[in-house]
């Protein structure tokens, strides 16, 4: 029996359809949801990502405020730009595109984003709130993984989830979110010994390691659910799709899996923020 394809495009379309109604209701109240994106420098991949996010906003009627700063921008100048956006009541979400030029203190810049506008989930306060289970805006890729799990009714309670990767905006937060859903979670990384054996014990595998075709089908337990959050050059995920497909009960493709839902979650959290701010203004 072939595995269930966890179709991210289908999930993303469902999210966006519901968002269109909510955006319309906000506009009827005189509120236009607005996401500000900040790009520092001229990295072509970053430029493409920012453009994609802006276009996705505009298709839903969300305003996209694009700020492009020169690569010579200092940390202080970037912090000042973020401060101004924090104070701007017409801006509901702020996204600082990663990476910034190396001379900038990126962590200081992330931390300066107001928590109520941290729709990309990059602040340590946001991470802490996510860990405690009451955060409004988790990092978008972990949020996308949970959204796919919810959409397809993947059972989490009591299951063993193995997360491969421990980055602060993917591996760590998704581990906490799975734990909060009563999964038993093992977080693996580059120092983990006997990784294939660890993965073999998993009911749910979240691949977030950033290495193409890293996880092999022979490492999987028969019937495991595989969520591939990797996106490497050539549209290749972190799991070896063909061999994992043979062992999994459900699997996300790359492209068309976690990626489309990640962008939809950014849009959703911007609309969430606009609704919260609209209520507070009233």
Image (cartoon, grey):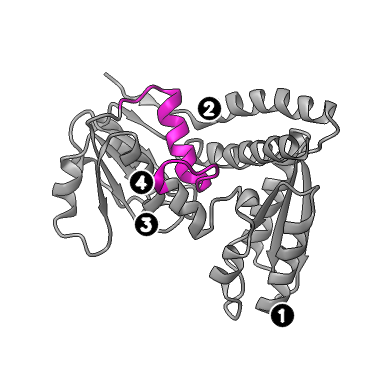
Marks 3/4: CA–CA distance: 22 Å
Marks 1/3: CA–CA distance: 31 Å
Asked if the magenta segment contains residue 71, the reply would be: no
Pair 4/2: label in front: 4
Q: Label 3 belongs to which residue?
A: 211
Closer to the chain start, of discs 2 and 3, is: 2
Name the foreground residue: 42 vs 15.
15
Q: Please tell me whether mark 2 sits on a helix, a strand or a loop.
A: helix
Asked whether, in this view, residue 216 is left or right of residue 63, the answer is left
Q: Please tell me whether mark 4 sits on a helix, a strand or a loop.
A: helix
Marks 2/1: CA–CA distance: 40 Å
Regarding residue 138, the answer to whether it shows in the image is yes
Q: Label 1 belongs to which residue?
A: 72
- The residue at 46%/53% (across/down) is 127
Question: Start and end of the magenta stretch?
Answer: 131-155
- The residue at 34%/55% (across/down) is 165
Name the foreground residue: 15 vs 173.
173
Closer to the chain start, of discs 2 and 1, is: 2
Q: Please tell me whether mark 1 sits on a helix, a strand or a loop.
A: loop
Asked if the magenta segment contains residue 143, the reply would be: yes
Counting from the top left corner in percent of width and height, residue 32 is at: 81, 38
């Amino acid at each position: 029996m072939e595995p269930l394809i966890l179709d991210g495009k289908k999930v993303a379309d469902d999210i966006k359809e519901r968002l269109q109604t909510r955006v319309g209701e906000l506009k009827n109240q005189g509120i236009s949801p607005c996401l500000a994106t900040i790009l520092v420098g001229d990295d072509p991949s970053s430029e493409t990502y920012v453009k994609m996010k802006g276009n996705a906003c505009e298709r839903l009627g969300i305003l996209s405020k694009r700020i492009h700063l020169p690569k010579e921008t200092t940390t202080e100048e970037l912090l000042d730009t973020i401060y101004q956006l924090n104070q701007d009541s017409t801006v509901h979400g702020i996204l600082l595109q990663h990476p910034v030029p190396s001379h900038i203190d990126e962590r200081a810049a992330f931390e300066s984003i107001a928590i109520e506008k941290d729709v990309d989930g990059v602040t340590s306060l946001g991470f802490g709130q996510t860990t405690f289970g009451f955060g409004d805006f988790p990092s978008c890729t972990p949020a996308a993984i949970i959204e796919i799990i919810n959409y397809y009714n993947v059972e989490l309670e009591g299951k063993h989830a193995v997360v491969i990767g421990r980055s602060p905006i993917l591996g760590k937060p998704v581990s906490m979110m799975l734990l909060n859903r009563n999964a038993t979670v093992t977080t693996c990384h580059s120092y983990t010994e006997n990784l294939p054996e660890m993965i073999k014990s998993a009911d749910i595998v979240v691949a977030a390691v950033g290495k193409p075709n890293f996880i092999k089908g022979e490492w999987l337990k028969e019937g495991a659910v595989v969520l591939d959050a990797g996106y490497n050059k050539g549209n290749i995920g972190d799991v070896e799709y063909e061999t994992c497909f043979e062992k999994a009960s459900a699997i996300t493709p790359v492209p068309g899996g976690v990626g489309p839902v990640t962008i939809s979650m950014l849009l959703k959290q911007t609309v969430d923020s606009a609704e919260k701010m609209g209520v507070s203004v009233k």
